[in-house]
Structures are given as structure tokens and as C-alpha cells.
Image (cartoon, rainbow, N blue to C red):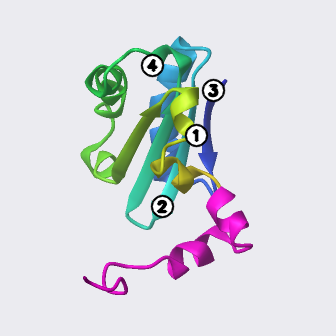
Amino acid sequence: MGAAIHGTPDEVTERVCAAVRQYTDAHPTAEALVSRYSPVSVRVRVIDPGFRGKSRSERHKAVWPLLYQLDEEILAEVTLLLLLTPDERATSAADRDFTDTFASEMNLSLPEALRRMPTSDSVPRT
């Protein structure tokens, strides 16, 4: 299935994508998506049926070594590594960062939807 970049590619997302592509090349049923979340944050999602029955630790041990090959400056921008089975994707709140579903539900662009999300300062305290 491969690895892809969501949004406009840049040097960092291209290098991160190349690193996780090593995983998808070795696991043909896996797919990876790399997304620039902010100017200093890149998020990575890998969906693999092969993760079924594996702990989070086992999953991370399979992917992080590929990312550790990156330069320290690039690796520092990886702020989320989301490793899911296809079934877990439906219930993962973090997966929303990789889809436009949340924004389209509100009929907004993804950046606008994120700007409108409540912050901890705007939530009433009880």
C-alpha cells in the first residue's frame, strides 16, 4: 500500500516518509501517512493489519528504529507516531488529525476546524 505525505511536502516530511516507507515496503498490507501538523511538528500514522495482537510497545519497536536513522533535527519534529490496526482506526481520536472528516462534519477546512476547537482556557471549570 505504501507511504504518502498528506498536504504539501517539504524536506522533513519527505525524509520521514522515506523512513516509514521502509516499513511499508517490508509489510505490503501496511499503509503510512506523514502529515505536517505545524511548522515544528510532523505526525506519522501507520495502519497495519499485522499489528493485531501486538502491544503498543511491540508496534513501536517495529517502526521507531527506522525513524532513529534520521538526523536529530528531523527526528525532533516527529511529535506523534500513531500505530493502528484497521479496526482501531475507527475508534482512534488521534486518527482525526490525519483525515478531513472532523472538518467536513463541521463544513470547515481542517485548519479552520482546528482553530475553532475549544482550548483548555475556554472550557468552564467545575
Give the distance between the C-alpha atoms of the residues marked 1 and 2, in whole angstroms. Answer: 21 Å
Give the distance between the C-alpha atoms of the residues marked 3 and 2, in whole angstroms. Answer: 20 Å
Q: Which of marks 3 and 2 is nearer the N terminus?
A: 3
Compare residues 57 and 79 and report the one nearer the observer. Answer: 57
| Residue depicted at x 46% and y 43% | 44
Instruction: Give the numbered dot on residue 2.
Output: 3
Give the distance between the C-alpha atoms of the residues marked 4 and 2, in whole angstroms. Answer: 25 Å
Q: Do the residues labelled 4 and 2 touch (CB within 8 Å)?
A: no
- Name the residue type under label 2: Tyr
User: Would residue 37 be found to the left or right of residue 124 on screen?
Assistant: right
Q: Earlier in the sequence, mark 4 or mark 2?
A: 2
| Residue depicted at x 63% and y 26% | 2
Q: Is residue 116 above or below residue 104?
A: below
Q: What stretch is highlighted in magenta?
A: 101-126
Compare residues 2 and 45 and report the one nearer the observer. Answer: 45
The quadrant where residue 77 appears: bottom left
Nearer the camera: disc 1 or disc 4:
1
For mark 4, what is the residue? 51
Find residue 57 and report its horizontal and vertical position in percent.
Answer: 26, 25
Q: Are marks 1 and 4 in contact (CB under 8 Å)?
A: no
Q: Are marks 1 and 2 in contact (CB under 8 Å)?
A: no
For mark 2, what is the residue? 37
User: Would residue 87 be found to the left or right of residue 58 on screen?
Assistant: right
Mark 3, Cα crowd under 10 Å, few <14 / some 14-19 / many 20+, is some
Compare residues 70 and 109 and report the one nearer the observer. Answer: 109
Which quadrant of the rendered structure holds the N terminus?
top right
Q: Is residue 10 above or below residue 27?
A: below
SS for callout 1: loop
Nearer the camera: disc 1 or disc 3:
1
Find residue 28 and report its horizontal and vertical position in percent.
Answer: 61, 14
For mark 1, what is the residue? 90
Query: Could you tell me if residue 88 is visible in this image?
Result: yes
